[in-house]
Amino acid sequence: MARPRTAARTVEHPDLSEVSLQQVLEALVDPVRRMVVSQLSQAGEDKSCGTFEAPVSLSTLTHHFNVLREAGLIRQYYVGTTKMNTLRTDEMEERFPGLLSAVLAASTAQAQADTA
Amino acid sequence: MARPRTAARTVEHPDLSEVSLQQVLEALVDPVRRMVVSQLSQAGEDKSCGTFEAPVSLSTLTHHFNVLREAGLIRQYYVGTTKMNTLRTDEMEERFPGLLSAVLAASTAQAQADTA
DNA sequence: GGCCGTTTTCGATGGCGCTCGTACTATGGC
DNA sequence: GCCATAGTACGAGCGCCATCGAAAACGGCC
């Protein structure tokens, strides 16, 4: 079967005007997903799915990435066999001013308190 | 009416240093609870439990008030037979800067978009 | 081609929280 | 004392979501 199947796996991302506050809050309320977002924020650069630390299985992690993407919090793209993730920080800031930054701040503050 | 049996009904409130980000997010993720918080914020003054509009039964509403109180979002006190509610705005702002205000802003913005 | 590493899909499971109705308590007025 | 009003406690039902393991897709590499 000749298939010019342009591989280049693509990923669907919502326009942030289409995501609701409800969706974003539901995404951020899960501790594992907040971990992912935090690690992504602190890394300062894109991270592949396999490089995150979380107390769940890989298949569960995939589920969380889907939720985060559908809530407009992350953007994903393939690089070879790995899938990279970026925080949609600026877009979120425009859509829900102060929300993501407040959660991230509280999140890291609490992480430091736990370590201290 | 010497009635020492029941001291004026009191309500327990957590110190905000004891509430976690997780608790607050879990409280705010429920649409009904967000409605309550919004109405309280927009009222500009304390409201009794019976004056809220929500698409749930009274007993369910009681449950939501409990969750909000335990998350440190509202303060409750009795006045006669009614129970009043206040937003702990300033305390929350100190504990989780920008969080509640961001949610409230997004919440009212979306409400206006729906009405428009 | 064949293998390996990376991520996904699928179905099943388990627990938690929203919801309700009903019965109950508490307060104030008559 | 008695009733009305305001809110609560309790128990049950139910749906949803996080979680997992196993097996499959997909690309790269030799």
Image (cartoon, coloured by chain):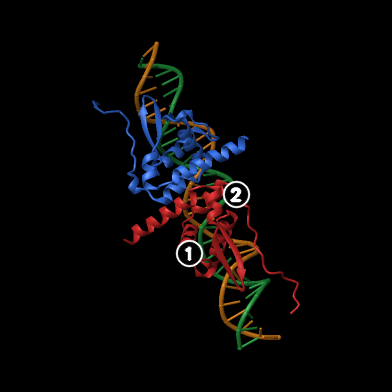
Chain colours: A blue, B red, C green, D orange
Query: What mark, if any, has residue B44 been given in the picture?
Result: 1
Whole-percent x, y for residue A99 in the image: 44, 46
Count of marks overlaid on the render = 2
Write down the residue under mark 2.
B19
The residue shown at (50%, 53%) is: B28
Circle 1 crowding by C-alpha within 10 Å: few under 14, some 14–19, many from 20: few
Q: Which amino acid, mark 2?
A: Val
Q: Which amino acid, mark 1?
A: Gly
Whole-percent x, y for residue B72 in the image: 58, 54
SS of the residue at dot 1? loop
Q: Is residue A41 left or right of residue B21?
A: left
Whole-percent x, y for residue A33 in the image: 49, 40
- Residue A29 higher or lower than C27, as above or below: above
**Residue contact between numbered discs 2 and 1, judged by CB atoms under 8 Å:** no
Chain of the residue displaying label 2 = B
The residue shown at (61%, 73%) is: B81
